[in-house]
Each structure stands twice: as structure tokens, then as C-alpha cells.
Amino acid sequence: MTAMFDPNAADTTRPVPPLVHEGPDMPAFISRRRSFFILLAVVILQLLLLSLQITRNNHVPLIRYWAVEVFDPFERALGGLMKVTANAYKTYRNLWHAEQENQELHMQLVAARAQIQQLGEQAGESQRLRTLLDFKSQLPYQTLAAEVIASSPSPLDQPSENSKVLTAVLIDKGLDFGLTSDLAVISPEGVVGKILAVFPHSAQVLLITDPSSGVGVTLAQSRVQGILKGGSNSLCRLRYVMNEEAVGHGETVVTSGLDQIYPKGLPVGTVVSATDGGIYKNITVKPAVDLNRLETVLVVVKPPSSEQQALNRIR
């Protein structure tokens, strides 16, 4: 059966024409205007040649003048940037050196302060020893210098009225220096206490602030006698002074020598308060010595008895 011819049907036997690019064709554009570009190149070349030959003021070629004008802003910007960078680096280097010098000076300052503190401590110790030796040389009885090496609560293990009160100290002299118990311990400021226990190379000193201590004392102005006992808050109590006795605030209290331990006339403290009680006055005394800052003391050495001297002669 023969197929019928359709005049409106697409002809598939004809080749499809290629797509045409509608944009400008650069090689063709240049080839069509070749004479123009050649003329432009000749003009530019002539200008360059003229600029090489033409000079401005001071015989500067025009091409060089143009080049300077074109590149001068860039050179200025680059020079400014390099200058800023150099200044920043110089500042950083100076700051780094300053920090190093600051650290070295800080270390030197710390070392100098430590040295000054050490020298001050040595000077203070020398002054204390000088004062102690001067006081020792003026005493009419023999004494032995000792250093405080430790502190402790009441050696009798009795609870004091205030647990913060220092009641005993340990000194660096003992049996090796011939010390015995019940020897008075003093300082240039006044009475400290007495030796309670003696060890081979040390001794324990019972301070006058301990409740178990007792010192025979006399009021310097009224000459009234009493017994000084340990109290509270680093203070002492003066006992057995009758109510009718006149006791003034700030009156000096000295040793009476009646206890056979402390030499007569040594400062003990001052009266800070005195009120009437049942029979006896309630008198509070502040010790003459700051017992919380003891460093060096003097032990009053008793001369050997006649019996001991005779025994020593026999030996």
C-alpha cells in the first residue's frame, strides 16, 4: 500500500543548519578595523618617541616626568607603609627591652628588699644584745644570757583563764650551764618568770602570766606589798591588798624580794585598774615585759651555798 504524501510534514532528509553565534567575532572585528589599530599604534609610538625627545624644566624627559607622576602616589603609599611598619617594629622592640629591664629591676628590687630586711633583722638583734649586755653589766648579781627557742602552754597542764595567753617558754641553756629550778628569769624591761624544769641542754621557764605563778611585789609609791598571780588576756592580778589601801592607776609594781626567787626592786608591771572587793582589792596589772615577743633573756644565777662551796673544796 502506497503512503500518502503530506505537504505539511517536516522534511527529515534536509540537513539542520548550524547555530549562528550572534555576539561579535573579535578576530573579524579586528581584521575589519586593522587600519585603525595600526594608525593608533603608530600614534602611540610617535608620542613615546616625542616624549623621549621632549624635555621639561631642568632637562627632564617628558616620559620620565609622566612616569614619575603616575608612580609617585604608589611610591608615597609604599614609603608611608614601610615607615609605619618600621616605627611599629621599633616600638615593639623598645617595649620588649623595657619589659626585660622591668623584670630584671623587679628581681633586683626583691633581692634588695630581702637584703634590707635581713640587715634590719641583724641590726635589731645587735641592738637587743647590746641592750642586754649593758643591762647585765649594771646588775649587782651574776646572770646568764639565754635565747628563747620555743613556747608552750602551761607546763603544769592546768587550764588557764585564757588559752591564748603564753604561759611558758623554752630557753637554750640547761644543766650543761649549771641551771637549776626556781631561778629568776628577767629582761631589761623587767621580770619574765622563773625556771620550772631543767633539761640537759634547755630549760622551761614559767612566765608570770601563768595562773600557778607567784611573785612577791611592792607598789612603788605606797609601798604596799602583795602577791602577783597570773590572770587573763596577758594581764596579772595583784592579790592580798586591803581595800583601805590607796592604789592609783598607773602605779609601778616592783619585786619585793620576799619570795627568795626574784631580786628586790625589779620592774614587774603597772596598775591598769583597782576596785574594792570583799576584803581585798581587785587589782589588774599589765606586765612590764611583752611576753609574746621574747627573744633573749637573762637567768639570775644564784651563788653556791656555803655547804656546796665546802663540798667543792673537798673535791
Image (spheres, rainbow, N blue to C red):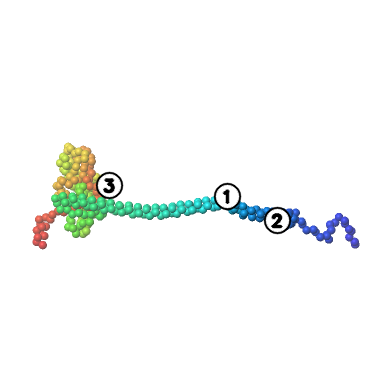
List the residue tagged with mark 2. Answer: 38
Foreground disc of the pair 2, 3: 2
Is 182 displayed left or right of 82 in the figure? left
The spot of residue 27 in percent (x, y) is: 72, 57
Mark 1 is on which residue type?
A: Asn
Question: CA gap, disc 1 to disc 2?
Answer: 33 Å
Residue contact at pointers 2 and 3, CB within 8 angstroms: no
The spot of residue 232 in percent (x, y) is: 25, 45
Name which of mark 3 and mark 1 comes first in the sequence.
1
List the residue tagged with mark 1. Answer: 57
Residue contact at pointers 3 and 1, CB within 8 angstroms: no
Disc 1: CA contacts within 10 A as few (<14), some (14-19) or many (>=20) = few
Mark 2 is on which residue type?
A: Ile
List the residue tagged with mark 3. Answer: 162
> 256 or 31: nearer the eye?
31
Disc 2: CA contacts within 10 A as few (<14), some (14-19) or many (>=20) = few
Foreground disc of the pair 3, 1: 1
Instruction: Residue at 22% x, 59% y: name it.
Output: 201
